Image (spheres, rainbow, N blue to C red):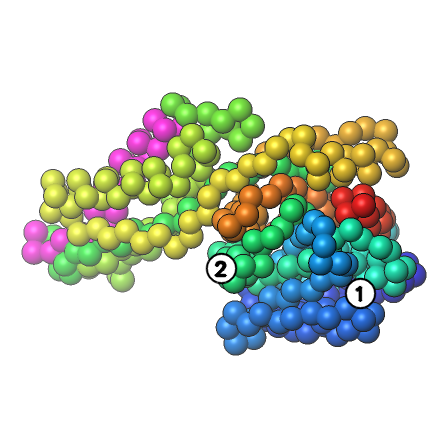
Amino acid sequence: MNKEEKIKVLQDIVKIKSVNGNELEVAEYIKKLLNEHGIKSELIEYSEGRSSLVAEIGEDNGKVLGFTGHMDVVDVGDEADWKYPPFEAHINDGKLYGRGSTDMKSGLTAMIISMIELKDEDVKLNGKIRLLATVGEEIGELGSEQLTEKGYADDLSALIIGEPAGTSIVYTHKGSINYRVKSTGKEAHSSAPAQGINAINYISEFINIVNKEMNKIAEKYNNEELGRTIHNVTVIRGGNQVNTIPSEAELQGNIRTIPEFDNDKAINLIAEIIKNLNEEKDCKLELTIDFNKIPVETYKDSEIINIIQDTWLENNKEKLSVIGISGTTDAAEFTKSKNKFDFAVFGPGEPMLAHKVDEYVEIDNYLDIIEAYKKIAKRYLS
């Protein structure tokens, strides 16, 4: 492909509105493109309008290098706040603007084009590259969970996640838990509160206790790379009108976990707080876990990370930093496979631009990563 074709493919994919869904349209575009270059692919349906895609090039003998990226994007917010419309893939001053341009359609597209070019150039690989394009990463890592359950990660030797990494390679990241607590009370007129049970008060008591206990955990446990546990109550809903005692209230919270105080321990702590409140104060609180992704870690000096580093140094003076991050990726699901493998998060774009208004990717960075993926694959599968 020439430069203009590579840019157009990215523009086409960014223009597809796959906000928390509609990944099938992206997958069908990719499938058609791959088919034009003699690469077979398979759609894995998740639900109506949502399908992941799996494709391979190379030989069955040897190692299996996974390339993965997600096809969904987050909501754009108020489109009036955008300088350029979020689904027009506008180019200005060497930057391609649009929702998903950085997170992470540029990384996914770079992987697709690198595979196409390796195939078109008839490069001999001692093993194969497997593309895993997923649905629903932003709202539960749904596609990676499904593909892992179906065994698509069981024979991986290494996995590259094409999330934006800037000038870094990510080798570890925190886990993430989303939870809800529902409080049930009894309605009454606000002039006679004793005749009701205020559901918001129960929620308030829970918040005070959980914040205090999670602060203790954050002080006690620390990971050298990832730092401390993070906990936040982020959503509160309750009540219908100002002069009525509320019979229902609900909160949502998020915990970013580290191996020293993992997901099971964090969930058990919250469950214990609720159990004690229900027993001691006759509260009616119910816990629901909506999202439970584990912290993950590989080796800083793994083969795949060293190959990425060596490839980078061919055209750059400074080494990439090898770091941990608080955000989660599809690695949290793929690493639950039957086989243990090395992974690295390495892709075009700056992480700080993800989910923001006027998200963009530097076109030169996108094009450079295409070439980097090709070299990394050839070396890993040499």
Which residue does the image show at 42% across and 49% down from the upper left?
Answer: 292
Q: Is residue 209 magenta?
A: yes
Q: In this rendering, is residue 283 above or below 230? A: below
Cα separation, mark 1 vs mark 2, equals 31 Å
Q: Which residues are magenta?
A: 194-218
Three-letter code for the amino acid on which mark 2 is drawn: Glu
Asked whether disc 1 touches disc 2, contact meaning CB atoms under 8 Å apart, the reply is: no
Circle 1 or circle 2, nearest the eye: 2
Secondary element under disc 2, as helix, strand or loop, is: helix
- Where residue 88 appears, as percent x and y from the top left, is 74, 66
Q: Position of residue 175 (x, y in %)?
A: 48, 42
Residue 379 in the figure: left or right of residue 186 = right
- Residue furthest bottom as drawn: 48
Task: Give the amino acid type for the residue marked by disc 1 in the picture.
Answer: Val
The numbered disc on residue 9 is 1
The answer to whether one can see residue 142 in this image is: no
| Residue at 76% in and 44% down | 380
